[in-house]
Image (cartoon, coloured by chain):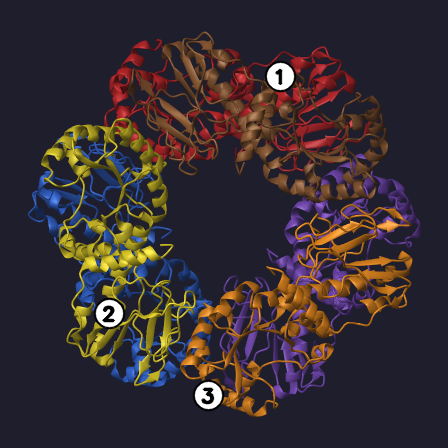
Chain colours: A orange, B purple, C blue, D yellow, E red, F brown
Amino acid sequence: MVRLFEGVPVTIRSLKEGTLFRNRSRRGVPVPIVRIEGKYADFAVYETPALGFLCQSSGISTMSSRYRKSAGDKTLLSFGVRRAHPAIAPMIDRASYIGGCDAVSSILGAKRIGHPPQGTMPHAEVLVFGDSRKAFDAYSRAAHKGTRKIALVDTFSDEKSEALLAARTIPDLYAVRLDTPKSRRGSFASIVSEVRWELDANGFRNVRIIVSGGIREEDIPSLIAAGVDGFGVGTAISNAPTVDFALDIVEVDGRKYTKRGKYSGAKEVYRCPKCLNFDVLHEGQKPARCPDCGTKQESMLHTVVREGKRTSKEESPDSIRERVLSELKSISEP
Amino acid sequence: MVRLFEGVPVTIRSLKEGTLFRNRSRRGVPVPIVRIEGKYADFAVYETPALGFLCQSSGISTMSSRYRKSAGDKTLLSFGVRRAHPAIAPMIDRASYIGGCDAVSSILGAKRIGHPPQGTMPHAEVLVFGDSRKAFDAYSRAAHKGTRKIALVDTFSDEKSEALLAARTIPDLYAVRLDTPKSRRGSFASIVSEVRWELDANGFRNVRIIVSGGIREEDIPSLIAAGVDGFGVGTAISNAPTVDFALDIVEVDGRKYTKRGKYSGAKEVYRCPKCLNFDVLHEGQKPARCPDCGTKQESMLHTVVREGKRTSKEESPDSIRERVLSELKSISEP
Amino acid sequence: MVRLFEGVPVTIRSLKEGTLFRNRSRRGVPVPIVRIEGKYADFAVYETPALGFLCQSSGISTMSSRYRKSAGDKTLLSFGVRRAHPAIAPMIDRASYIGGCDAVSSILGAKRIGHPPQGTMPHAEVLVFGDSRKAFDAYSRAAHKGTRKIALVDTFSDEKSEALLAARTIPDLYAVRLDTPKSRRGSFASIVSEVRWELDANGFRNVRIIVSGGIREEDIPSLIAAGVDGFGVGTAISNAPTVDFALDIVEVDGRKYTKRGKYSGAKEVYRCPKCLNFDVLHEGQKPARCPDCGTKQESMLHTVVREGKRTSKEESPDSIRERVLSELKSISEP
Amino acid sequence: MVRLFEGVPVTIRSLKEGTLFRNRSRRGVPVPIVRIEGKYADFAVYETPALGFLCQSSGISTMSSRYRKSAGDKTLLSFGVRRAHPAIAPMIDRASYIGGCDAVSSILGAKRIGHPPQGTMPHAEVLVFGDSRKAFDAYSRAAHKGTRKIALVDTFSDEKSEALLAARTIPDLYAVRLDTPKSRRGSFASIVSEVRWELDANGFRNVRIIVSGGIREEDIPSLIAAGVDGFGVGTAISNAPTVDFALDIVEVDGRKYTKRGKYSGAKEVYRCPKCLNFDVLHEGQKPARCPDCGTKQESMLHTVVREGKRTSKEESPDSIRERVLSELKSISEP
Amino acid sequence: MVRLFEGVPVTIRSLKEGTLFRNRSRRGVPVPIVRIEGKYADFAVYETPALGFLCQSSGISTMSSRYRKSAGDKTLLSFGVRRAHPAIAPMIDRASYIGGCDAVSSILGAKRIGHPPQGTMPHAEVLVFGDSRKAFDAYSRAAHKGTRKIALVDTFSDEKSEALLAARTIPDLYAVRLDTPKSRRGSFASIVSEVRWELDANGFRNVRIIVSGGIREEDIPSLIAAGVDGFGVGTAISNAPTVDFALDIVEVDGRKYTKRGKYSGAKEVYRCPKCLNFDVLHEGQKPARCPDCGTKQESMLHTVVREGKRTSKEESPDSIRERVLSELKSISEP
Amino acid sequence: MVRLFEGVPVTIRSLKEGTLFRNRSRRGVPVPIVRIEGKYADFAVYETPALGFLCQSSGISTMSSRYRKSAGDKTLLSFGVRRAHPAIAPMIDRASYIGGCDAVSSILGAKRIGHPPQGTMPHAEVLVFGDSRKAFDAYSRAAHKGTRKIALVDTFSDEKSEALLAARTIPDLYAVRLDTPKSRRGSFASIVSEVRWELDANGFRNVRIIVSGGIREEDIPSLIAAGVDGFGVGTAISNAPTVDFALDIVEVDGRKYTKRGKYSGAKEVYRCPKCLNFDVLHEGQKPARCPDCGTKQESMLHTVVREGKRTSKEESPDSIRERVLSELKSISEP
């Protein structure tokens, strides 16, 4: 979004991308995430696209973070681009990644984050071969060296027997993927538990289990307990609800006023670095220490554009993702 | 989506765009909406983008149709592009329009459907003037001739007094728009009813009332009863849940088989033109008459690409929208 | 129960076995189903066993009737004896049968009702062979001539592929039975619908589908809609809630009194033969015509024991069952 | 059940009767309670009766234990045989007793557990006398010496007045029993509290209060708080849901496989003697220490039949009940 | 309330007392029930007491009407004054009566409505005698000639036995009253049904049954079905929620305006005499015919005070009650 | 109530007015709050009015205490008299005050408690002026010196702008009052938070915020968090549910008995001064120490009338209120 305002005579301060924030401060005041100073006429034309960039990608990153929080240290793969318009696939993949996914599935998306794409064998392959064993064998031979081999084991027969067949057919099998159809999912956790038991019973303790297909956030803990090692998540992340940011005028020529439902005047945003609680202050007001732990609060709005000039380099997806993961650790619920 | 397959050696038959369909036939069999014949290797690369085009835009059109069904003959405006990535604004606007919206708000989207964009005065204008009367006056003078003037009446004071002020200030006011903030919406229907009463009491019976801001489908009937003439709908439509279509192989070299959870073999789709109930048949099976009304059922899959050649011209958004509106009339619930 | 009182100097009048009755008359008075006259000291010792006979078997017959009502003209098999103490297997099977089941599974139970037992191949057979095809083949050869062959198709692979395999292996296959484990039952109706589709697609339109395993009464309509031809029901019937009949003294030497919560005095029971509504009257009171349809009501208590002598022959299970089925047709809900 | 297999050439290992177990181990694997080794042909015929013995009596014992856990050290009497078929009365009483009931009511059942049956005066007695005082007096004179006299106080008048009448009429009254009809049970706890108060107010502090009639497990705590000293429980225990055990083949000639939904291979069962959590292991696997408390886990499957020979004497109901009561103390919820 | 404004220079128009009205017109406009014209300074001091009179008594009358609607033609007695401050007992009784009660219990209240008070024997009487039979006998002798004798039958023993005792002791017993304590009310309807049965069984078919004690509106249908002839209702009516009327200024010197949430300008109120739907119009607007049935609508605001002079005589409680009962008949729900 | 019994030859002991008590003792016995000894004939006539005094005022005081507990140290004003009959306004105000309100609004009520009444400017004033600024100005000039000026800020415009206008117009403004109409109360807490923010942003940190209008007990915590300094509560307190006390005979001439549902005999009431748990004992029984904390329990029934003579002076409302507030502090929930 910053690129949009390069050359526009405004000064912009904002939270760093990837900062976890709550809707409102502990006193109930909405937290501003971007603050623009300038002549409205100069930037009015950018209002709609700027909001569009922010709202949709923030929605995706937020959902990705929630899944990451639930999944703990298990693998999390973003599979959702195929249900969204191709034009936004790179945006979706980048937002999923910085929110906490470990890898993405589109080629452009992968390029955007600077890491190789990741996928598994598709159902189509098994169907074209018309026989699971042949498909596993072909996949095993065709996969690029170094690729982690993940076999789909829900196509024709039961997951339990196909998982054993895959493990016996593909020598260096990394994982089996269960994309069990809804009509066969009486208890997905039980199916996973059985697959784990049979793989172990037959000496395949090192073959991992990955699940996909409509995985809801609330299903994750019981699936992990049943033995899941990784999750492929699709539209839950790519079609996440947008975050409904709005751009509001809060001060004109030093006069503080705004519309009903908004808070007038330029504001400062502070946060306790330990408790992560936010404080929103009238400009010029001095921040108190954190009422919970007494720590000095930190100013959170950083200048990113000064008079139309970018004041810092673009941050890498990895660096933003690092911030998200580190802050996620400090909070107790997703 | 059709354009994607031009030059690809496949034959495609599909429902006409804008055909209302149910997930499953009356016998519980899923209704296929597109049927592709060809060598899988020839079109596998198009699977992901093709699904992306279909799933997201179908989700948006479906939601737009539901709002249209609820809104009856009231005005329905698509306002949601500002919360989605700018790259898909034209797609969102087109899908909203063919689903049943009367107008769209983005310039590219409007061009895509061949009709002028439609909007209202923005909150920013009122705020920049810092006074509702001045803002109404300026808007009244600046508006292009022929534009329907719609005044925002929720910025500073109560909707009731601002509506009267707008009606008194703008001579040819077409409508007032209530975008009342959530915190002031105890009963939106009551506010509308009061505004209607006061406008009437003061001789402004011809000024319409348009509402916007998080309008839910289920709110519409009571708002119409209270006097609403039009609705502006945003993310409910632009961020609608995608429709989770999938592409499945169901027959290989004349052998009918498919994966668990799917129905094997090439299929024919029939529909009763009166009851709109679908029937899915094995290829070659002859359609029965409609079990409800005895009408002859019609074949619904039309060839759109034959051996990589488009067999018909692209249909205009207006023509597709016509089909949607006409079919909507035949069903009893959204 | 009647046999218990042969030789006991009492006179007993009761509803005919298999009569449908409600707990209370249309005026809210509990309907007595048996009326005993005699010296309490003479029959006190039989109170507990008589109640035991009535309460448990009535509970089972009632539940069987409910399933019959839901299942309409589909096949209903009683499979539940294996989860109950072997000593009551014949009682369970007889009660299931007169309540409306078409056949029972225990040998003694079958003898008790005078019809051959009915079952299917067991899971154990498939497991002992370790391969579905071999098991189907062995079952096909071993089955007695004239037996309807029913193949279990949920043991190793998916129901869809095993059903096709069974149909191809057993030339005169009567039905496939789906006893799908709970963990694989995301939507049992969908699995049934798929199996039906694949059997049809491959030319096995005449192979029936039978389901079993924790079938709940409320699941039946959707399963029939999906294509089920028969149901095997187990503990839902064999472990049905007992009907809590009690034996109460309501008149002593012509003095009418009883304990709190009961209705004193000898009673007559009438029923409208068309509406099946009951009326409970003080002895000697004359029955009115049915308040709904004006039909003459019929007296329902028939003398079965007079002074310790049985006054009629024991009725056959078939005859009792006939009565149940005929009355079930007259009521609208189970 | 063990008796059934005497002389059958199989080896059986099982949990000791009365061992508390959960459905699944802490890892989600179902806990096997009996393990049979042998030729399937040799014991197939016993499958149905063996399951019947286990499922119904386990259901009854389990429910009895739940009531015992809720009732703490209050008296618990099994009253339910009169609503079940007389043939299984001894089984019901034995299962109730080993599950935790203090006494049973049928004569055969009492013989089966080696303790005298226990009951109270019946409603019929009061009704035959037609007057509570006379009935109490007669009961007082007729009762065997040494019997604990328990008077029914809900027949004609209010519990409060009948309880006082009984206490004044029967010199050595042990308890009053409230079998209050449903229609008079607005708050059973309040009635009990009043009866306690009036007995105390009139000097009968040593007369106990026993309640019966549809007592639900969840009612017990508030009834104890109100002053109840004992409970008579009927069909809740005698008609308890059966436990749905199944007999599955899990290994054939050393090959580990089983049907879908089951876990293959012979298994060992371990339990932490302190936490009572179960672990199910592949045969040969070595048990870890309890992950919660570090205690060494104990093997739970004990050989009861070796090659058709019983390896230990039948355990007495008292000894089994002892085990149940001792384990119940270690768990926190019923 | 009208008396309050005698001599105050205002003109008042209002709905007639006892007119059933809905909160809002069919168009959603609140229905004004009183319209005052005059100088605000002249009547401001009467605002609070006038509202007080209206709000509390309207609440009571409304609740009384709801009970009347539910009770149909059964007797309805207002018993609630003893739980309200004695100063408002006459107001409560009058409001209960005009709302639909058949009689009231306070002496002043009865005088206020011009009918004798009505009650039953009290619990205290039975307790002072310490014996139900003596109390019934004393009550029978002491009651004024012509009084309908109603005996309380829930004091010491069960309702069933006390009802019989009362019927046998009091020769001309009109009714028994069941004020069963909450703790004994498992199913009040069942107790009533039993009492009816026993009275009939013993030849007392003409003794009525009256119930009291926390009778909720929704309990009434099942109690009538069980045989209740009359209801005594207490705090449900006397402590009914007040109706929250407010007095609003809606026009000043011909200028129509009012506060937010209100509708400005003097209004006319019309009602369809058949459908009872209300229409609220701007003054001067002409009423349409009823949109449902085409009947001419009637003006509902009647002048009661003109320039401080009462324009009609005070209406009698009986006449107002007549209006309520007649309008109640026209509506389908309470 | 005590005054009623002066000169009546009875002895009365009761809890002190303002004592917090629970319905039942820790053993489930109802707590008597007044105990009368005497000849029933002497005081029977006072039963109804005495109950009336107690039940309604106790209901109001109880509700007032609940609001006080929720409101903590915020201001609580009783506004409800205008919706109740004027005859009981003083009773309502006194009961509200002793229950914990800080001030009352009726003139007689205020006299009754010995403190000046408290109110705010009314909506009528703003409407008569037809302009908020003029109304504020007039109010500012007219208010008595020393009155705390509270301006209503919800009449014409939004609360935020009217609050600022009031603060700028009235130099010594004490508070603004938000009586926001229901239809504008989407989130009352958010409106309060915005008003607080704007007042602060414009230098009016010392202007308080008072809310009124249907404030429910459960809304209070979130409103305090949003910045509310005081509450005006109306019918929730003045129309509170009455407390359903009853007068029961429990002992006659030393014989202890009472009706069903009651506890017989004269009783003593004890309370632990620390835990506030009650114990109800048979007369003469010695109180144990508190089972929770071991403190000596205190006798709670104090003689207020001895043989018709008052034994102590009437307590002042302030003194009673002091007791309520002090006991409220000891309990954890309202």
Indicate which label's residue lies in the foreground, 3 or 2.
3
Label 3 residue SS:
helix
Up/down of B105 relative to C264, above or below? below
Of the numbered discs in the image, which one, if any, rests on residue C101? none
- Side of E119 relative to C282 (left or right): right
User: What residue do we see at 67% from left, 56% from top?
Assistant: B67
Label 1 residue SS:
helix
State yes or no: discs 3 and 2 in contact (Cβ < 8 Å).
no
Quarter assignment of residue E135: top left
Instruction: Quickly name the residue at label 1.
Output: F112
State yes or no: discs 1 and 2 in contact (Cβ < 8 Å).
no
| Chain ID, mark 1 | F
Q: Of F200 and F164, which appears nearest the observer? A: F200
- Side of A333 relative to C55 (left or right): right
Alpha-carbon neighbours of circle 1 within 10 Å: few (<14), some, or many (≥20)? some
State yes or no: discs 3 and 1 in contact (Cβ < 8 Å).
no
Work out whether disc 3 and disc 1 sit on a shared chain: no
Type of amino acid at the residue the image marks with label 2:
Thr
- Side of E211 relative to E45 (left or right): left
Type of amino acid at the residue the image marks with label 3:
Arg
Q: Of F322 and C137, which appears nearest the observer? A: F322
Q: CA distance from mark 1 to mark 2?
A: 84 Å
Q: Would you say residue D279 is visible in this rendering? A: yes
Residue E105 rendering spot, x and y as whole percentages: 45, 17
Of the numbered discs in the image, which one, if any, rests on residue A168? 3
Type of amino acid at the residue the image marks with label 1:
Arg
Residue B24 rendering spot, x and y as whole percentages: 54, 67
Instruction: Quickly name the residue at label 2.
Output: D48
Work out whether disc 1 and disc 2 sit on a shared chain: no
